[in-house]
Amino acid sequence: MSKDEKTLSYGRHSVKASSWNKLLFPDAGISKGDLLRYAEEIAEFLLPHIRDRPLSFERYPDGVQAQGFFQKNTPDYFPDWIRTENLEKEGGSIVHTLADNTATLVYLANQACITIHAGLSRVQSVHCPCELMIDLDPSGKDFKPVQTAARRLKEFLEKKLDLSSFVKFTGSRGLHVVVPLREDERFEQVRDFAKDLVQAMADAYPDDVTTEQRKNKRGNRIFLDINRNAYGQTAVAPYSVRVKSNAPVACPVDWSEALDARADAQRYTVKNILRRLGQKGDPWSGIRRHAVSIGKRHERLRRS
């Protein structure tokens, strides 16, 4: 075996890692081997957030400066110890990969799966989401308008609807705000609630946020994107790496950190996220304890 190849073992499963020294993020000096070690070390924090959820991937075999591709269907050559689930889609089905152990994450990293995208429901109740997600998408690079919109959304959820929310840096430009759900309502119900919620926000703060899909109609307002709240849609997983030159990660944070004047959606990267987690832990570790139903809250929203 050459120095560019290694065999990594995790209990009953082994991963034959290849091209260990290939630079996947040349500007940051991050090799494929670094990505595999990251997958190994981040597993305890990442796996609880994606376990039992259908996954899709952004793959960049020749590094992030080369052409990549998006993969939903599990290739035939994946080992049989990796869990999969055949889920229906319009006109057919997709065999999605699932990840419930460290070996799977490392294997995916060896396949140059840079970014992991997870469905908003678990395969056991695939038509009933376990979270509602709102993507705060800015028109420009200024992060402060994103923070203003996020603060107002948090306050609206708490004061008007008695809902706890969680927030993460996307690792790109914006923030994701998440409300954990009990999985007793279908995507259609949750999406209808989300539509009414963001419209109420847009009515209350018309100069700051918008529900306008067309970019040329948004101006400098923050787009409150709810499009991921549908069957078959996905969102970047917590602690997943983004396809950016500095290898930022999508990082769950406390609300105080998200709204801090020094905040930056790309603040945490492959190189510094583990130090942060060692100091502060995962702020989303107890997220499922806050899961709620939104039926009665939707009625309250409609009356307000």
Image (spheres, rainbow, N blue to C red):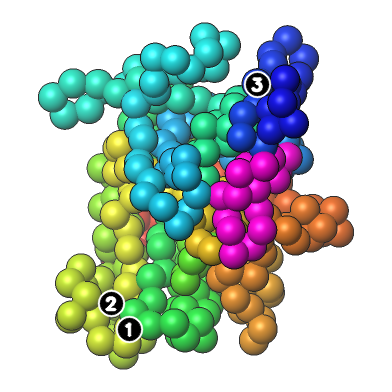
**How much space separates mark 3 and mark 2, taking CA atoms?**
48 Å
**Residues rendered magenta in the picture:** 21-39
Q: Using the image, tell me which numbered label, if any, was put on residue 197.
A: none
Q: Looking at the rendering, which quadrant does residue 249 occupy? A: bottom right
For the residue carrying disc 3, how many other residues have a C-alpha within 10 Å: few (<14), some (14-19), or many (20+)? few
Q: Mark 3 points at which residue?
A: 16
Judge whether 26 appears above or below 292 on screen: below
Q: Using the image, tell me which numbered label, if any, was put on residue 221.
A: 1
Taking depth in this image into account, of 293 and 119 the one nearest to the observer is 119
Instruction: Give how far across and how far down residue 18 sits, in percent.
Output: 62, 29
Q: Which residue is drawn at 58% across and 58% down?
A: 26
The amino acid at mark 1 is: Arg
**How much space separates mark 3 and mark 1, taking CA atoms?**
48 Å
Q: Is residue 89 visible?
A: yes
Q: Is residue 12 left or right of residue 261?
A: right
The amino acid at mark 2 is: Thr
- Residue at disc 1, secondary structure: loop
Q: Which of marks 1 and 2 is nearer the N terminus?
A: 2
Instruction: Give how far across and how far down residue 285 sits, in percent.
Output: 70, 46
The amino acid at mark 3 is: Lys
For the residue carrying disc 1, how many other residues have a C-alpha within 10 Å: few (<14), some (14-19), or many (20+)? many
Taking depth in this image into account, of 60 and 188 the one nearest to the observer is 60
Q: Mark 2 points at which residue?
A: 210
Q: Which residue is drawn at 41% across and 52% down?
A: 66
Q: Residue at x 65, y 48 (%)?
A: 31
Judge whether 22 appears above or below 211 on screen: above
